[in-house]
Image (cartoon, rainbow, N blue to C red):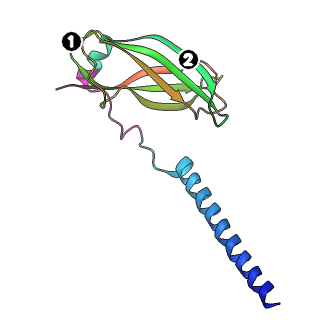
Amino acid sequence: MAIKSQEKRSFNSTLFVILAAVILIAGAGFWFLFLRAVPSSSQQVTLTPEARAYVSKLGLSDVEMKAHENYMKATVVEIDGKITNRGNRPLKLVEINCVFYDPYGQLILRERVAIVKRTAAALAPGETRPFRLPFDSIPSGWNQTLPQLVIARIDFEN
């Protein structure tokens, strides 16, 4: 009889540990998805007057959108295209805002992404470079059209 009581206590403590781990993981997932601090638009760097004047010298071309299912059976939307630097200055960073709308024209997602990254070589004058932007968390109310692409930041190479 004492053996069954010990086994029951061992089973209860194992169940408690598993339940605590599941609650901890669920709480961390909830925090990551909904509560973590996201920089507000006032904290994000805006275009400097110099960068604003240079925007007209950048060209986006061959922009296409496609969707596919990833290995976790979730839909991933990809935007592929090319950026061309038609100006006379090398660029070490170019970020764009991808703005997604619902069927009624209401903004449902604005995501800022780099299409020229600091970790890569600078985009030289006259150079064209491909970019690929994957999105896997677009809200279901999205109107399924290409998002608005707006240059949000340009950093020049020194």
Task: Give the total number of marks visible in the rendering.
Answer: 2
What is the span of residues highlighted in magenta in the rendered image?
Answer: 41-51
In which quadrant of the rendered image does the N terminus lie? bottom right
Residue at position x 78%, y 90% in the image: 2
Q: Position of residue 50 (x, y in %)?
A: 23, 21
In which quadrant of the rendered image does the C terminus lie? top left
Residue 149 inside the magenta-drawn segment: no
How far apart are the alpha carbons under marks 1 and 2? 30 Å
**Is residue 14 toward the left or the right of residue 119 in the image?**
right
Q: Which residue is mark 2?
A: 65
Residue at position x 23%, y 19% in the image: 90
Q: Which residue is mark 1?
A: 88
Disc 2 secondary structure class:
strand
Residue 46 inside the magenta-drawn segment: yes
The residue closer to the viewer here, 84 or 111, is 84
Task: Say what amino acid the circle numbered 2 marks.
Answer: Met
* Residue closest to the far bottom: 2
